[in-house]
Amino acid sequence: MASDFAKAKAAIESKDTEIEKSKRVALDKAKEMIAERNRYHCEYKQDAERIKGLEGELEAARSKIDRLEAEKTEEA
């Protein structure tokens, strides 16, 4: 009976060790996924800012084109 108890205890400890290892692996994977998500979010924000800047430049270029075309028609 003592050997059965020792075997059961060893089996439980082995399973506990496996569970703890699985938890660490899952936690590490979750940390990696969070880091990746944060990186993509930062890239998204930077891209959104670039788009706003480019839209502003495009609007300025369109205004300049309109002004130059107006000047050209006035001269003609």
Image (cartoon, helix red, strand yellow):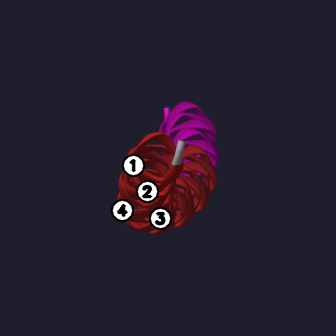
Tell me the magenta residue range. 1-19
Do the numbered discs 3 and 1 sit on residues whose CB atoms are within 8 Å? no
Question: As shown in the figure, which amino acid type bears the numbered disc 2?
Answer: Glu
What is the distance, in whole Å, between disc 3 and disc 4 at their CAs? Answer: 4 Å
Quadrant position of residue 40? bottom right
Q: Which residue is mark 1?
A: 74
Query: For residue 56, which numbered disc appears in the image?
Result: 4
Q: Main secondary structure of the magenta part?
A: helix
Q: Residues within 10 Å of mark 1 (few under 14, many from 20)?
A: few
Do the numbered discs 3 and 4 sit on residues whose CB atoms are within 8 Å? yes
Tell me if 60 is positioned left or right of 43 in this view. left
Q: Residues within 10 Å of mark 2 (few under 14, many from 20)?
A: few
Question: As shown in the figure, which amino acid type bears the numbered disc 1?
Answer: Glu
Q: Single out the mark in the foreground, 4 or 2.
A: 2
Q: Which residue is mark 2?
A: 71
Query: For residue 57, which numbered disc appears in the image?
Result: 3
